[in-house]
Image (cartoon, rainbow, N blue to C red):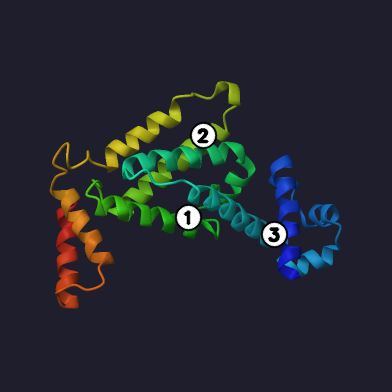
Amino acid sequence: MDDLKRRQILEVAAGILERDGEPAVSTRSVAAAAGIRAASLYQLFGDKDGLLAALAIHAFEVYLAEKRELETTGDPVEDMRLGWDRHVDFGLRHPAFYLLMYGTDRPGRQAPAAGEATAELRRFFDRVAAAGRLRVPPDLAVTMCLAACTGVTLSLIATAPGRRDPELSGRMREALIAATTTDPPALADPGLAARALALDAALATADAVALRPPETALLRDWLTRLAR
């Protein structure tokens, strides 16, 4: 019952957030809109910070559910385009959610649910590397992608709809793709760095490797150096 009540309260709070923005979300306003006592809300979420943290988790769950609906095209770079476009579209459809998810009220602070979204992005870039299409190490690709995509989305949210540059997102997306990926191997040699990253990704996911652990660690260190 508590899980159902918690979900219902979060949906009410999400409605207030999307309609009136984060300042309108308070334990009192949410309790009144949900038809419960403030004490009941405190038992479930604690103070306003606890409620906002739960809302951020809820927002990431909605976001990830939408992203997982995307079907792979078989081309990791085209999948990257589709993922970027879905990310930006989500932010523009749910600006208050997005600011709660990716905004920050102090340096070094990140929404508690952001880790799963970042981990999923890392798994995606591992697949790109395994396909021989990644130009930079996966961790750097994740950092570049998050910085570019969230930066563009926050910039668009901050701009009045009628003044938004319709080409900004696409240009930034293609610049990121050019900086992080290579052409298909059938069309051009991906180069030593991409081959090293592909082998490193294969080693990371292999069930068994005919090397002792120290040898595997040394080989992966060499591959990382070759990928720089």
Q: CA distance from mark 2 to mark 1?
A: 20 Å
Q: CA distance from mark 2 to mark 3?
A: 26 Å
Name the one closer to the observer, 90 or 47: 90
Classify mark 3: helix, strand or loop.
helix
Identify the residue at image location x=25%, y=48%.
136
The residue singled out by tag 1 in the image is: 117
Q: Which residue is mark 2?
A: 155
| Residue identified by numbered label 3 | 51
Left or right: 111 as drawn, with respect to 193: right
Q: Is residue 19 above or below residue 202?
A: above
- Identify the amino acid type marked 1: Ala
Q: Identify the amino acid type marked 2.
A: Ser
Q: Residue furthest top?
A: 162
Q: Residues within 10 Å of mark 1 (few under 14, many from 20)?
A: some
Query: Identity of the amino acid at label 3?
Result: Leu
Residue at x-position 76% and y-position 52%: 12
Quadrant of the rendered image containing residue 94: top right
Of the numbered discs 2 and 1, the one sitting upstream in the chain is 1
